[in-house]
Image (tube, grey):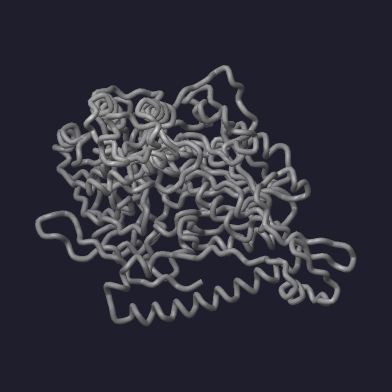
């Protein structure tokens, strides 16, 4: 295709302001400027193909535009140049390209919302098609509302194309690793969950964040779920919990059950407690087997929980497993996963596999046996590699709980069906796309290109529901950058510090512990994200230290200037007395939860007396502070000797291999 100068300039300007210089427009511009980049030794790598629209991304500006034009379209001035080159000898063309280059690089102009979000059009009605990533209904009316797509793109999409589309927020998260701060309201989430739980016979999966157990179970949950309704409690993020002994998972599970009782679920119909990591896949296959054997096709399954508990990640893991109907698991849209709470706006769902189909379950069991044999062999090899290396024994590669979530190949060919059903091969006629039995039954062999839930009227569905915010969590006050810092992404190596009666410990600017009174010094074992700083100061200097360093890199969190800090609740305190009834010699006496920050284990330093201390604990608005029995009692395994002239201990990565499951 050939362009004159004016057509080229108008085309570039229009494409930029409507769609931004990325995606399809970036690919087209790249094809125009590729030869110029080679000619001037400047690198320009094309982006991978993205969906139909994206947002503005600055691209390198070329020095020369190189094109091949037909002879009848080339001006006399251009004919004097070398064939195929339009150099910057034409002042008019040079000025236009420089003007476009400035626009692409954002030089000399203020941020224009239309160049970022596209053009809204309130005259077009909201569609009935939900976003495949978050569940919000797609529209082009307002870019501050959930489910928004620019009108330039929305008008061109058909209903079938909308079913494969995602809203602008999900698109940014998936392809640009950026976040638009639009969140679902807590009232909206509660309304949806109340409707579905009151209507249908169903199984409830309650997802709990093991990093913040009791705060992940809001006080309205016992009233929201009827006592007769079966519940499977899922403790997620077990991969970040450090192991203090080979049997630590049993202690974690006991803590989850005890916390459920404290939160009012003691008389509810809890059928199972599963510890998993949706991120690493640990325990997910075992959870799938539990759901298929215990519940099967008795009704729909609804997954509920607080925001940032990992529900969307678990939804994607189950969607890409045997739990999803094998014919559509490769075509259903994945849920959008983000550090921002409230990503899922409405329910997302997929049909589950029919557990009554014996040959499918037999093929799955065989695949699991083969996988377990491979895992056992790998476990033995890992043990041999780490036996003589302390560094490898402490490596997260070997100590982190992992598990592969695989898909069984349910191809309906003659060999597999005869093997798992016992049918005679002569009873089948084989065509190109279908398998037909002698009784007239047909089995479609090809995978579906598109997914329509109306084609599965007799199936049971798995639902991912919007997360709700607990009043005890501080997540709603934090920005995306702060949420990334506060959320651990790998196994925690806790900080160990010595707290004396005249000391104060700051856990970033969001947590504080003062020693009020007691019979001995105590050790604090602090389980927080490794990205967060810990400081110990004199109690008399604590206020000055906090006021001086809040909002700076010294305390780390919260981030921002004075106006941003004023929006956060001030630090408020609760006094907690630790006086355990049982012997706590050489073990932790109690855990103190600090809302979404993590938790702190308290251990006494004297062998001759039991711990009896009172601590003053601070969080924003005193949210999420509670006392519980220690989950990881052997706190001494996490520290080495004390650092000279400080109250901090050298941290010790536990060299305990997790026992094999």
Furthest residue toward top: 123
Q: Nearer the viewer, residue 478 or 360?
A: 360
Q: Residue at x 45, y 31 (%)?
A: 182
Q: Please provide percent x and percent y for residue 534.
A: 23, 48
Res. 625 visible in picture: no
Counting from the top left corner in percent of width and height, residue 164 is at 59, 41
Q: Is residue 346 left or right of residue 42?
A: right
Residue at 37% in and 38% down: 480
Residue 290 in sight from this viewpoint: yes
Q: Nearer the viewer, residue 87 or 504?
A: 87
For this orientation, the residue located farthest to the left is 645
Q: Is residue 542 left or right of residue 334?
A: left
Please name the residue shown 41% across and 57% down the image.
631
- Establish if 367 lies above or below 239: below
Q: Nearer the viewer, residue 339 or 525?
A: 339
**Residue 626, located in which quarter of the rendered image?**
top left
Residue 464 is situated, as x and y percent measured from the top left of the image, at 59, 44
Give the number of marks.
Answer: 0
Image coords of residue 166 (percent x, y)? 53, 38
Q: Quadrant of residue 553?
A: top left
The quarter of the image holding the N terminus is top left
In the picture as drawn, the residue positioned furthest to the right comes out as 439
């Amino acid at each position: 295709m050939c362009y004159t100068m004016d057509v080229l300039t108008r085309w570039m300007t229009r494409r930029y302001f409507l769609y931004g210089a990325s995606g399809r427009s970036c690919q087209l511009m790249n094809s125009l400027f590729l030869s110029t980049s080679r000619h001037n030794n400047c690198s320009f790598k094309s982006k991978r193909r993205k969906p139909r629209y994206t947002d503005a991304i600055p691209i390198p500006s070329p020095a020369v535009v190189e094109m091949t034009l037909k002879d009848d379209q080339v001006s006399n001035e251009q004919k004097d140049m070398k064939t195929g080159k339009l150099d910057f000898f034409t002042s008019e063309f040079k000025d236009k390209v420089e003007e476009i280059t400035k626009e692409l690089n954002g030089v000399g102009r203020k941020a224009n919302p239309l160049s970022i979000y596209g053009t809204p059009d309130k005259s077009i009605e909201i569609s009935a098609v939900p976003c495949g990533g978050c569940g919000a209904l797609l529209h082009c009316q307002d870019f501050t509302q959930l489910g928004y797509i620019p009108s330039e793109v929305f008008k061109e999409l058909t209903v079938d194309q909308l079913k494969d589309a995602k809203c602008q927020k999900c698109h940014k998260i998936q392809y640009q690793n950026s976040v638009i701060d639009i969140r679902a309201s807590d009232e909206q989430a509660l309304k949806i969950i109340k409707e579905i739980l009151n209507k249908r016979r169903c199984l409830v999966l309650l997802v709990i964040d093991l990093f913040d157990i009791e705060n992940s179970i809001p006080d309205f949950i016992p009233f929201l779920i009827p006592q007769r309704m079966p519940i499977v409690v899922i403790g997620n993020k077990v991969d970040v919990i450090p192991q203090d002994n080979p049997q630590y998972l049993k202690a974690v599970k006991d803590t989850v059950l005890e916390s459920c009782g404290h939160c009012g679920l003691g008389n509810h119909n809890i059928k199972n407690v599963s510890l998993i990591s949706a991120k690493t896949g640990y325990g997910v296959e075992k959870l799938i087997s539990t759901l298929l054997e215990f519940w099967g096709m008795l009704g729909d399954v609804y997954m509920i929980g607080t925001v940032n508990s990992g529900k969307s990640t678990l939804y994607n893991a189950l969607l890409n497993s045997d739990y999803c109907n094998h014919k559509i698991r490769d075509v259903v849209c994945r849920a959008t996963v983000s550090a921002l709470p409230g990503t899922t706006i409405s329910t997302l769902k997929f049909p589950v596999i029919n557990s009554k189909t014996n040959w499918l379950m037999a093929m799955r069991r065989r695949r699991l046996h083969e996988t377990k044999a491979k895992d056992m062999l790998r476990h033995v090899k890992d043990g041999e590699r780490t036996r003589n290396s302390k560094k490898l024994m402490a490596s997260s590669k070997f100590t982190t709980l992992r598990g592969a979530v695989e898909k069984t190949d349910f191809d309906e060919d003659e060999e597999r069906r005869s093997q798992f059903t016992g049918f005679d091969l002569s009873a089948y006629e084989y065509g190109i796309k279908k398998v037909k039995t002698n009784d007239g039954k047909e089995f479609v062999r090809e995978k579906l290109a598109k997914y329509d839930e109306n084609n599965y009227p007799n199936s049971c569905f798995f639902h991912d529901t919007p997360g709700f915010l607990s009043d005890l969590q501080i997540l709603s006050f934090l920005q995306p950058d702060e949420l990334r810092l506060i959320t651990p992404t790998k196994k925690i190596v806790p900080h160990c510090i010595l707290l004396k009666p005249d000391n104060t410990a700051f856990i970033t600017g969001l947590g504080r512990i003062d020693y009020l009174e007691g019979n001995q010094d105590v050790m604090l074992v602090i389980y927080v994200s490794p990205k967060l700083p810990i400081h110990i100061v004199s109690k008399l200097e604590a206020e000055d230290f906090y006021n001086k360093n809040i909002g700076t890199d010294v305390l780390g969190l919260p981030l921002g200037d004075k106006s941003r800090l004023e929006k956060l609740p001030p630090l408020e305190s609760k006094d907690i007395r630790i006086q355990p009834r049982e012997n706590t010699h050489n073990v932790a006496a109690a855990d103190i939860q600090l809302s979404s920050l993590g938790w702190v284990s308290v251990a006494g330093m004297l062998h001759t007396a039991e711990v009896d201390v009172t601590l003053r604990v601070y969080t924003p608005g005193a949210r999420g502070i509670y006392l519980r029995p220690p989950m990881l009692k052997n706190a001494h395994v996490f520290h080495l000797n004390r650092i000279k002239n400080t109250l901090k201990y050298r941290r010790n990565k536990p060299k305990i291999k997790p026992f094999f499951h």
